[in-house]
Amino acid sequence: MNHDRYDAAYLSGILQETKTIAVVGASPNLARPSYGVMKFLLSKGFRVIPVNPGQAGKEILGQTVYANLADIPEPIDMVDVFRASEYLHEVIDEAIALEPRPKAIWSQLSVRDDFAAKKAEAVGIKVVMDRCPAIEMPRMGL
């Protein structure tokens, strides 16, 4: 897949079939983008599960924080990644190991690793990189 440009139908399809989102790199710091996006996703009715090993067992926006994806005790539809590009492959490897696997992996602005994306796509996981759902949803009227 070409990750330089996404059709609106591809993005909206992912977002409309998503109910539960794991936010990897979630932060309790109100000034961090992950906090604002998490708050936005919660306001849109998504079940949002923060993932941050340094905050595990605490809460962010009233949601229990888990150390990693494997610790989450329920299926995840989408993984939203707030980690630097060099860590995206690790998050994708973690997501691929889940049973059931998430339907999509979405990495935030400036986060991209085409090799890791191909790995996820090879096992049927949709990938969006260098985009923010909190920007795309209002743009598409969702």
Image (cartoon, helix red, strand yellow):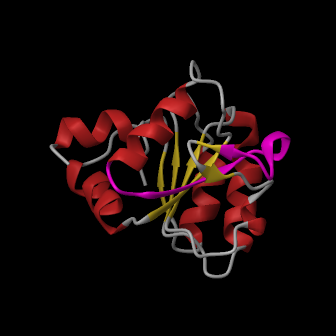
Q: Magenta stretch?
A: 44-59
| Residue at the spot 42% in from the left edge and 36% down from the top edge | 132
Q: Residue furthest right?
A: 54
Spot the residue most to the left: 141
Q: Nearer the viewer, residue 92 or 37?
A: 37
In which quadrant of the rendered image does the N terminus lie?
Answer: bottom left
The x and y percentages for residue 117 are: 58, 53
Q: Residue at 57% across / 18% down in the picture?
A: 31
Q: Residue furthest top?
A: 31
- Where in the figure is residue 28, as x and y percent of width and height? 66, 32
Q: Left or right of 3: which side holds 123?
A: right
Q: Could you say which quadrant of the image residue 5 lies in?
A: top left
Judging depth in this view, the residue of 120 and 106 nearest the camera is 106
In the image, residue 74 lies at what x, y percent?
62, 75
Would residue 52 be found to the left or right of residue 63 on screen?
Answer: right
Is 52 one of the magenta-colored residues? Answer: yes
The quadrant holding residue 131 is top left
Q: Which residue does the image show at 60% across and 75% down from the upper left?
A: 101
Q: Give the residue at the far bottom of this rendering.
A: 99
Q: How many marks?
A: 0
Q: Quick check: is 29 in the magenta stretch?
A: no
Q: Viewed as shown, does residue 119 lie left or right of 4?
A: right
